[in-house]
Image (cartoon, rainbow, N blue to C red):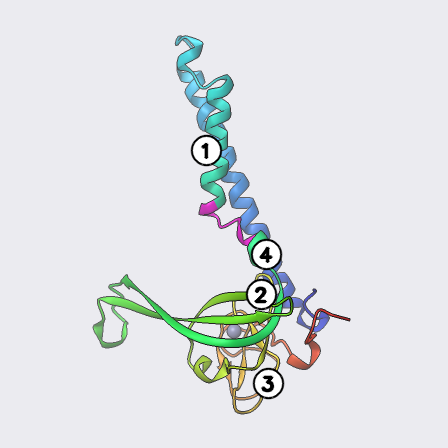
Amino acid sequence: MRIPRQNRDLRHYVLRRDVGKLFLYALWILSWCMGALAYNLNHQTYPPERRLLGWRLALWIVAAVIVGFFLFRIHSFFLDRDFIGTLESVGLSHTYTGSRDPGAFRSAQYDFRLHKVLTVRLENGKKKRVRVEEKQGSYVYYRIGDRLIGLHGLPYPINLDSDEQTGYACAACGRVHKEQLPHCDQCGLSFLDPAQLPRTFKK
Ligand SMILES: [Zn+2]
């Protein structure tokens, strides 16, 4: 499924993030290879079994591939797929991170983040859980029974039944606006119009 043509900036946003991720991943693997090369060059007098050659080199590169795979969240290319479904339940979870942000509200030592766990019933009957950070307004935006669409690379699913009551969310930053604007007033990216999005994968 493609992001509608009028949201070209959102397409670029997703593409930039995906390409950036793959670029960092490639750079990461390359740096491990360079490390092995530098090690071998610096230890030329060592016998071959003490240098990174043959299966040792292969193991080294496999380790780089695996560690980088999780570090750069490459698995999201396989797991973060488009979906359409009906919101069945909404749960909450939270995280704390230490923060010494001087501008923080109430001089908090900790940064408290609340997340929503959305359980969506897909068309094939399976359940999908999506975790998004709670933003002002998302409490009413994700209304049980409404139809949601999630697009690859955009963290916030769009409520296809959104109206004046729920408000309209930005798919990129999650800010909920009272009305459907051309652009999000927080991140500046364009708004996905629920009327332009499919309600089903089935034709
Ligand atoms: Zn936004």
Give the percent coordinates (x, y) of residue 175: 48, 77
Q: Callout 1, which amino acid? A: Ala
Query: Which residue occupies the foreground of this view, 111 or 79?
Result: 79
| Mark 2 vs mark 4: in front | 2
| Mark 2 vs mark 3: in front | 2
The image quarter containing residue 79 is bottom right
Residue that carries the numbered disc 1 in the rendered image = 63
Q: Secondary structure at mark 3?
A: loop
Query: Which residue occupies the foreground of this view, 183 or 96?
Result: 96
Residue that carries the numbered disc 4 in the rendered image = 16
Label at residue 126:
2
Whether residue 146 sits left or right of residue 5 in the image: it is left
Label at residue 34:
none
Residue pushed farthest front?
125
- The magenta region covers 70-77
Count residues near mark 4 (Cα–Cα under 10 Å), then give few for <14, some for 14-19, many for 20+: few
Q: CA distance from mark 2 to mark 4?
A: 31 Å
Q: Secondary structure at mark 1?
A: helix
Q: Callout 2, which amino acid? A: Lys
Q: Earlier in the sequence, mark 3 or mark 1?
A: 1
Whether the magenta-drawn stretch holds residue 76 is answered as: yes
Q: Earlier in the sequence, mark 1 or mark 2?
A: 1
Q: CA distance from mark 4 to mark 3?
A: 25 Å
Q: CA distance from mark 3 to mark 1?
A: 47 Å
